[in-house]
Image: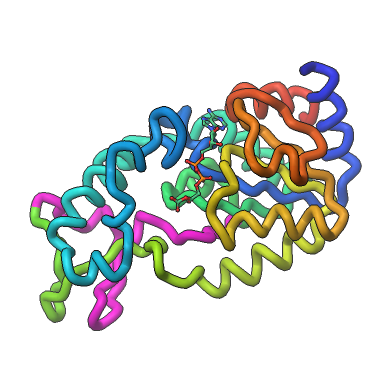
Amino acid sequence: MELLIKEAARIIKESKSTIAFTGAGISVESGIPPFRGEHGLWNKYNPEVLDLGYFLTNAEECWIYIREIFYDFFAEAKPNEAHLTLAKMESSGIMNAVVTQNIDNLHYQAGSKTVYEFHGNSKKLKCLKCGKVYHAAEIDFTQIPPTCVNDGEVLKPDFIFFGEGIPSEAYSSSFAAAEKAEVCLIIGSTGEVTPASYVPRTAKQAGATIIEINPEETIFTSAITDIHLKGKASEILTLLGKQLF
Ligand code: APR
């Protein structure tokens, strides 16, 4: 592994444009369960609670689970060494952008500035009728579903539900960054969800070297990965950071 870490660090140092594509796995060591795999949230909860059509007709039921998954769990989570290393890479000029599927806000909390949130962010909620935006910190989650002060309509978390489109700014910025990347790190993602998983594939097609950080093999590994650093995100990125800084 040490040789692979050294080789990955050499390639990153030589790169003129590096991006990171992150999934739920990078936040597991911050206490947030992944969606899939042995302890995956979708083993415990029905993904239907995040289906837009179902939410619009069953808001109260969905909010019980949404609060438990995304506000009870996420509220205490802090960035781990993996998030912090990516932020330090950016401030050291060797990371151009983070494209994240995560809605937990941990990249921003770690200090990353250029973050494209492909699936939105759980820290904001929106009124479905008038569009008023709320910050999660100002919501009383003991009253669910939370409603708008203007018109009493149900608030929806400002992250993407199944059946919703990807935020256009995040979408275009992510693919533009992927097309220019010479290196793309893939950290903690099964790659099972599209169109997000097309971002690293676009980088690969544009000639980027793919460095994957994950304790498991994924559909990326055999398809596009050049170097698989097999291990937990915070452990691997701590070792990588020692070679980079
Ligand atoms: N470090 C790195 N990777 C890890 C760790 C860890 N400590 N623990 C688990 N993983 C890996 C797992 O091996 C798996 O490959 O993280 C991945 C988690 O996969 P998913 O839960 O499918 O997460 P992700 O790929 O981000 O899911 C994509 O699915 O439900 C939707 O919108 C949701 O953004 C999410 C999308």
Viewer-nearest residue: 118 or 242:
118
In the picture provided, is 22 more to the left or to the right than 74? right
- Check the picture and name the quadrant holding the N terminus: top right
Q: Residue at x 87, y 51 (%)?
A: 16
**Residue 231 screen position, x and y as percent:** 63, 23
Viewer-nearest residue: 125 or 48:
48
Residue 140 colored in magenta in the image: yes
In which image quadrant can residue 44 be found?
Answer: top left
**Residue 182 screen position, x and y as percent:** 84, 51
Viewer-nearest residue: 160 or 37:
37
In the picture provided, is 135 more to the left or to the right than 21? left
**Residue 87 screen position, x and y as percent:** 62, 42
Count every numbered label the image shows and give the total. Answer: 0
- In the displayed structure, 76 sits above or below 121; it is above
Q: Residue at x 82, y 38 (%)?
A: 226
In the picture provided, is 1 more to the left or to the right than 76? right
- In the displayed structure, 178 sits above or below 187; it is below
Q: Farthest left residue?
A: 143
**Residue 218 screen position, x and y as percent:** 63, 37
Question: In the rendered image, is residue 67 in sight?
Answer: yes
Q: How is the image coloured?
A: rainbow
In which image quadrant can residue 140 be found?
Answer: bottom left
- Check the picture and name the quadrant holding the C terminus: top right
Question: In the rendered image, is residue 93 in sight?
Answer: no
Specify start and end residues of the magenta stretch as a single range: 115-142
Q: Farthest top residue?
A: 2
Residue 129 colored in magenta in the image: yes
Q: Residue at x 42, y 70 (%)?
A: 164
Q: Residue at x 15, y 75 (%)?
A: 153
- In the displayed structure, 178 sits above or below 98; it is below
